[in-house]
Amino acid sequence: MYLTIVIANAGGYVDRIVETELMTNIVMRYKDDSSFRNLSEERQKELIESRFKSEMKRRGLDKPFPIRSVYHLKSAITLDLGRAMYMTSDGGSALVKNIILERLPVTVILFTTATVINFFLHLFLGLRLSRKYGSFWDKLVIALSPTSVIPGWFYGIFLIMIFYSWLHILPPGGLVDYPPPSGTIPYFLSILKHMVLPLASWIIASLFLGIYQQRTFFLIYSTEDYVEVAKAKGLTPRQIEYRYLLKPALPPVITGFALDVISSWTGAIVTETVFNWPGLGHVVSQAISYFDAPVIVGVTVIYAYLLAITVLVLDIIYAIIDPRMRIQG
């Protein structure tokens, strides 16, 4: 956690940039004051320096970074993420925690849904493709798998052009229609309608590579000796797939799924910007443009927590699904 704070703050470099920006803002604010311009140059410098020191103390930047980093660690552990410098939540709160918690569910709705759909789609199609090794469809997926290096937002631009600009059947972005529909069901249906294009862009972006990876997993396990023994015993293909392919492949498959969920919560900054999706990725994009360091560090800390929780949950799941990893009493 401490290393996360140090890295997110670039070892104090971010604070130095904030100090420079703070000084610039103070100078610009005073320059617009006619009474300030009538003062002597020495008096102007005194006022600017006094205001700068006052702001530095108020923001806790007057202490050395190693000391401040310890305070940051304490705050991170207690989820006291401080106040944003420029940004506020839709409710008007400047607390970083409120800004993040307000947008996190919106990101979870979209990107966790996309990750879950991708997981089952890749698993099902990858298993089916492993039965048809060397077929036309197998070669087609292998040939198209490099297309997954293209990010989802790139496909999203073309989807917007086709389904919004040309066909006029789907909205180009946003969370709901404007004005928002009244009633729970119309509001929910409006969200679903706005999710179609960003969901489709993410599914298309990872489709062929995801199928190829799962197909390769199952092909590797299908060459194991215990699979040949199961075939010799006369077990049906479905029994072999369930008992001797799916079960051994579950640990790496579940690991990939869990990490995909966490990474999806970063909100794919560009994708949310393209579709104007008001999630956490959009918040990070705004924080970077405003250089709102507390929000950037706060989001990084939240993801560190999510990653730690995910690793813990994975260890528990592994002990359940893989007897070899259970602790013997």
Image (cartoon, helix red, strand yellow):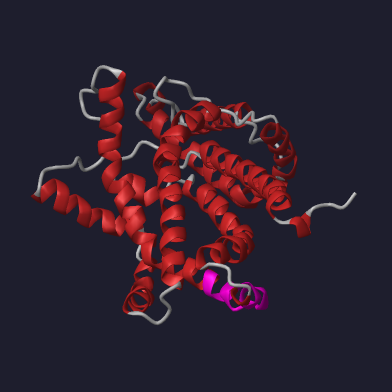
Q: Give me the residue at 46% from left, 54% from top.
A: 119
The quadrant of the rendering that contains the N terminus is: top right
> What span is in magenta?
218-230
Query: Which x, y percent locates residue 262?
Result: 54, 48
Q: Position of residue 211 (x, y in %)?
A: 42, 65
Furthest residue toward front:
234
Left or right: residue 112 versus residue 154 is right
Principal secondary structure, stretch drawn in magenta: helix
Kindly identify the residue that appears in the image at 49 percent across and 66 percent down: 214
Quarter where residue 297 is shown: top right
Q: Is residue 173 left or right of residue 250?
A: left
Nearer the observer, 224 or 2 = 224
Is the residue 256 above or below the residue 74 in the image?
below
Most foreground residue, 262 or 11: 262
Residue 203, percent across and down?
Answer: 35, 55
Residue at 29% over, 36% down: 192
Q: Nearer the viewer, residue 63 or 139?
A: 139
48 falls in the magenta region: no
Q: Quadrant of residue 65?
A: top right
- Counting the numbered discs, the total is 0
Q: Is residue 210 above or below residue 61?
A: below
